[in-house]
Amino acid sequence: MQANLSTLGLYQNTIQNAIQVQSQIATIQQQVSSGTKAQDFEGLNGQVQLYVSLENQLAKAGQYSANNTVLQSRLNTTSQTLGQVISTANQALNLMLQARNGSEANSLAFDQQMKSFFQTIAGQLNTQSGGAYLFSGTRTDQPPVDPTQYPTTVQLGVPDTGYYHGNSQNITSAIADSTVITTNVRADDPGIQKIMAAFAAAKVGFDNGDDQTLQQAYNLMQQGIAGVTQTQASVDASSQQVSHAQTISDTQVTYWKTLKDNTVSADLVSLSTQLSADQGVLQASFQVFARINSLHLSNYLSTTG
């Protein structure tokens, strides 16, 4: 239906206003149904930079959280393994003490038992986590100790790394901004070196009936156990540090997510109120449009004549 010449301007303004209100209503309805202010950056009304920044912060905190979860697991496994090494080394220490007791020495299958203890420790040091050897440095695809090769030393009673097949590089990890820590223990740790040297000296001492060498092996084993105990305490301290960083990163994930959601989330109560008002305006526009559309030039002339 066409408008009369006299009402064309009003007709066009009314149509334009109705279209604008309809568009606004459609936008609000989308916000109400989705719970967000916009489906793209254009609808964020100048908050794009803030939104992108919050997304980046959230992604970074989420990555720290994920990485620290993995690190925490590896450190826990490392600490548990070191505890097992200490336990096995103490059993070997007790066997050496018995071997030095003349009344019991002949009844011991000393070499066999010492070999068994060594193989147990080798197996413990060859522990893997996620398919990676934990005690090989950065050479995580290589078992650090060969359980079939009983340890020897270049110089009797002097620890060395002849038994070790990993490398000398440590694994470091960023657990938070500006916080990088070493997150591994190598099987050439000084305490472990002493334990291996003790195995080597104990065999020589027992086979030769040399109590002085057995005493040397016993002392080395004690020192090795003390050293590994200190290393385990250091691992536990690192684990606590990672746990603290994990708590912070988890808190940051929640914080940044809340800010991001607040940036894009719609105020449903305010939107519903505005939607109701806009629908009223649109209805009024339709009524005006209908009224204008029903007028004729003769109506205009009759009121002005």
Image (cartoon, rainbow, N blue to C red):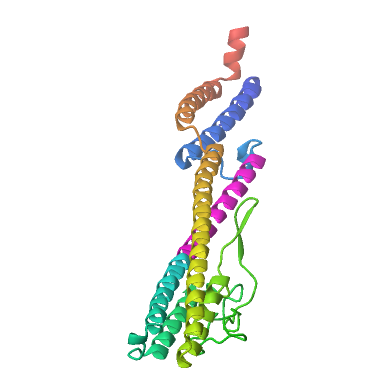
Find residue 150 and report its horizontal and vertical position in percent.
50, 88
Q: Is residue 186 part of the magenta span, yes or no?
A: no
Visible residue check, residue 105: yes
Image quadrant holding the C terminus, namely top right
| Residue at the spot 59% in from the left edge and 8% down from the top edge | 303
Find residue 300 and report its horizontal and vertical position in percent.
60, 14
> Does 154 appear above or below 60?
below
> Does 263 appear above or below 170?
above
> Does 62 appear above or below 74?
above
- Which of 222/272 is in front? 222
Find residue 13 and report its horizontal and vertical position in percent.
63, 25
> Does 159 appear above or below 257?
below
Visible residue check, residue 131: no
Type of secondary structure dominating the magenta stretch: helix
Q: Quadrant of residue 103?
A: bottom left
Q: How many marks?
A: 0
Q: In the shown orientation, is residue 98 left or right of residue 40?
A: left
| Residue at the spot 45% in from the left edge and 76% down from the top edge | 124
Find residue 184 and report its horizontal and vertical position in percent.
56, 66
| Residue at the spot 49% in from the left edge and 67% down from the top edge | 226
Image quadrant holding the N terminus, namely top right
- Which of 212/154 is in front? 212
Which stretch did the figure color magenta? 48-76
- Which of 185/71 is in front? 185
- Which of 122/176 is in front? 122
| Residue at the spot 47% in from the left edge and 77% down from the top edge | 218
Q: Is residue 53 part of the magenta span, yes or no?
A: yes
